[in-house]
Structure formats: structure tokens, C-alpha cells
Amino acid sequence: MTRSKVTRFMTEMDKAAAGLLYDANYDPHILEQRRAAKRLLHELNGLHPDDEARRDDLLKRLLGKTGERLVVEWGFYCDYGFNIEVGENFYANVNLVILDGAKVVIGSNCFIAPNVGIYTAGHPLDSERRNMGLEYAHPITIGDDVWIGAGVSILPGARIGSGTVVAAGSVVRGEIPDGVICGGNPTRVIRAILPEDGLRYR
């Protein structure tokens, strides 16, 4: 069976999961999945700050997987929610945006500063396909014990290793190793995080 015949039997979300171009703007099933997420996000972002139990419940309904302890501050936006998995002790500051056409897997003990964007989605370079509403999505993985600074953009297919710190304003693409400080556009490794880095706080 040819590839074109195979793709005819795939749903649009199957295509997205496979990294193929998929109809993100006109497919009825895709649109309803996004509307379902928007309903939960509308309630979540409008909650009173004291209503922590309801906030936890909505987050756990929205996201594909969570730990017991997670804090996501006001102003959280995503496409679907079910493609997002976070580990234990997850903290995200205000205005986190996750475009989760593909899986976004974030480990335990991760801290995300304000105004961070995590984007699995991309668009064709040629305007003909782009104007047809087609896009692609590549998964993003963030390891354990990662700190992502303010205003960071994480691009489709990025992988950030455990124990790494991403400096504010960085644009992350490709693979970042474990245990380093990285920054810039595009992000590059600045140096390893050393045992003596912990001494300054003692």
C-alpha cells in the first residue's frame, strides 16, 4: 500500500502524531477537540484565586497526565491539553502557552517562568499548503529538574535534558544536553552546571 493510500485512512490527529501535514483548521473533529479544551481553559482562567481545589480538578481533567502536586498560574493556554504530560512538583508562572498538536512531555520538579511558549506546531513554507490550513507537529521533551527562564520559546522537536537551566529570552531548537546552562537565539550551551554552583547559596 502506498503512503498516499495509508494517509487516507488516518485521522488528522493520527497524521499529527506521525509528524505529517494535517488539517488543523477545518477538520470538524480537530475543531471540536480544541473547543473542548477552550471550555476548560475559559473556566480555569476565570477562577477566583482561592478556589485551588477546582483549579487542580480542571487541570487534571485538561492535561493528559500530571503528578499530584502542580501549580499553573493564571493565563494558561493550550490547543488540546490531552497531549501534555507533566511530572510531579510542576510549577508554571503566568502566561504559559503550549501548542500541543504533538506530545509535550515535561519531567518532575520543573519550573517555568512567565511568558514561556512551548510550540510543537509549525507550518509549511509554501503559501499554497499553509493557506489550506495544513500544519505539522513535532513532539517536545523536557527532562526532570529543568528551569526555563522568562520569555523562552521552545520550538517543534526540541529536547531539553534533565537538570538544565534555559536562560531568559532563549529560542530552543534541537537537543540540549543534561546539566547545562544554555541561552541565546538559537540556544547554545554556555557551560556545565558544576557542584560548586550550589555553594553560593549556603
Image (cartoon, rainbow, N blue to C red):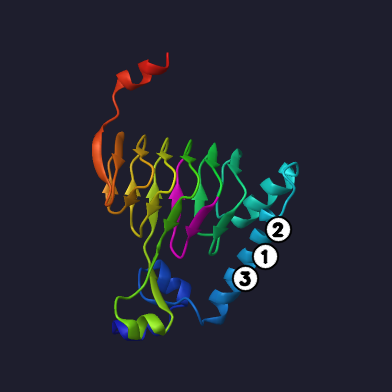
Q: Is residue 46 left or right of residue 38?
A: right
Front in this rendered view, residue 84 or 182: 182
Residue 201: where, in percent of width, then height?
Answer: 42, 17
Tell me which corner region of the image, top left, top right, bottom left or bottom right, holds residue 117. Answer: bottom left
Q: Is residue 106 magenta?
A: yes
Residue tagged 1: 39
Residue 96: where, in percent of width, then height?
Answer: 52, 51
Q: Is residue 6 magenta?
A: no
Q: Which disc is residue 35 wearing?
A: 3
The three-letter code of the residue at mark 3 reads: Arg
Front in this rendered view, residue 141 or 39: 39
The three-letter code of the residue at mark 1 reads: Arg
Q: Give the mark count.
A: 3
Q: Which disc is residue 184 wearing?
A: none
> Which numbered disc flags the more N-terminal residue, 2 or 3?
3
Residue drawn at point x = 66 percent, y = 54 percent? 45
Q: Secondary structure at mark 3?
A: helix
**Marks 1 and 3 close (CB-CB < 8 Å):** yes
Residue tagged 2: 43
* Magenta residues (range): 95-107
